[in-house]
Amino acid sequence: MKLGILGGGQLGMMICQAARKNNIDTIIYTDSSDSPAVHFSNNHFISNYNDISKIDDFINECDVITYEFENIPYETLNHINKKLNVFPRPSVNNIIQDRLTEKKFINKLDIDTVPFLELSSKKELSKIDEDFFPAILKTRRMGYDGKGQSIINDLRSLKNIEQNIYILEKKIDLKQEISVITVRYQDESLFSYLPIDNTHKNQILFKSISPALINQDLKLKALMWSEKIIKSLDYIGVICVEFFIDKNDKLYVNEIAPRVHNSGHLTIESYNISQFESHIRAVCNLEKIEPKLQKEAEMLNILGSDIFKYRDQVIDNNQFFHDYFKDEAKKGRKMGHLTKIKS
Ligand code: ADP
Ligand code: MG
């Protein structure tokens, strides 16, 4: 079996590592030469995601195709899907690539999001109540790790805003952030990992703890909402739903990642099957395995030049250091992670 992966980052790298364990060949398609995944794949292509002739060469090497980041152009996914199965389906990506269509989809399922405004007309702007502030202006497309976001404190700051580019979200007082990773197989069966607790610094994930310490009601609701979302999308593979919990213990879906997720890295050491292997098994239609927690775990992201410290450090038996082998240790760039298992 030959699995094609669009995107060459650390998520792709860990999919390749899990594929190797299952005797599946991997072929990476990436637009950057500094791509960790290519070192662990059997073959790779480097070109932009709109280069259809290169994409056709890639298709010819693969049996099934997936992606490790959500901003692959919809047209490219659609083109591939006419020739070869793409999982998750391009239609999923089309909804989730745009924060506005994503939130509307979630609300339609009777699932709560933080209040938001479309900002699609001047008329709408004039109706915004002062108590909607402070708010966060977010680009509808291409945002990640807090990029494309800014805090807005009053109506005046929105005066010259371009229409149909942003949404405006109410900023809420967060008590906790959690995520749920769910996998759905081609026979429509699904399994969820236990909710994971996430702490962000400068809007970038800093630390994840599994399982999250939350009350039973919140746990069940988060699992139920994740499963409702994955079913409604007729989704194949691993999905991650990010949640907010406010000071009154009210739950909201923040966003959906149609892929394996940073908060799930600790599943490699703390579960019988990692999120990466679950994804491969679902996408490649292999026998299913139910994820079971083996040990509690904590994961720390290693950003920028902090990586050099870890490369030289001797670590003990309960710690697992993952280096992404990126060439450039730019500030804030995810360079590796460390998982600590509680014994
Ligand atoms: P990204 O796509 O960059 O991950 P998110 O919408 O998940 O964007 O925002 C990143 C982080 O910023 C969140 O995990 C949360 O910590 C904070 N944040 C985002 N939106 C809100 C909000 N409406 N209220 C409070 N905090 C928020
Ligand atoms: Mg996020």
Image (cartoon, helix red, strand yellow):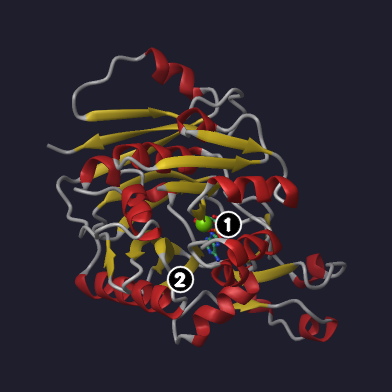
Q: Secondary structure at mark 1?
A: loop
The amino acid type found where label 2 is placed reads Val
Q: Secondary structure at mark 2?
A: strand
Label 1 beta carbon within 8 A of ligand 1: no
Q: From the viewer's perspective, is the residue at label 2 or at label 1 nearer? A: 1
Q: Give the x, y percent position of residue 60.
A: 59, 48
Q: Which residue is mark 1?
A: 70
The amino acid type found where label 1 is placed reads Glu
Q: Give the x, y percent position of residue 130.
A: 68, 78
Q: Nearer the viewer, residue 268 or 222?
A: 268
Q: Residue 247 appears in which quarter of the rendering?
A: bottom left
- As measured in the structure, the alpha-carbon distance from the residue carrying label 2 to the one carrying label 1 is 18 Å
Q: Residue 311 appears in which quarter of the rendering?
A: top left
Residue 34 in view, yes or no: yes
Whether residue 52 is situated above or below residue 40 in the rendered picture: below
In what quadrant of the picture does the C terminus appear?
Answer: top left
Judge the density around disc 2: few (<14), some (14-19), many (≥20) Cα neighbours within 10 Å: many
Image position of 51 (left or right of 41): right
Q: Nearer the viewer, residue 161 or 183?
A: 183
Q: How many marks?
A: 2
Q: Give the x, y percent position of residue 178.
A: 37, 60
- The residue depicted at 39 percent of the width and 12 percent of the height is 312
Q: Which residue is mark 2?
A: 253
Choose the circle earlier in sequence order: 2 or 1.
Answer: 1
- The residue depicted at 29 percent of the width and 29 percent of the height is 320
Q: Quadrant of ligand 1?
A: bottom right
Whether residue 283 is situated above or below residue 223 in the rendered picture: above
Image position of 71 (left or right of 166): left
Whether residue 72 is situated above or below residue 340 in the rendered picture: below
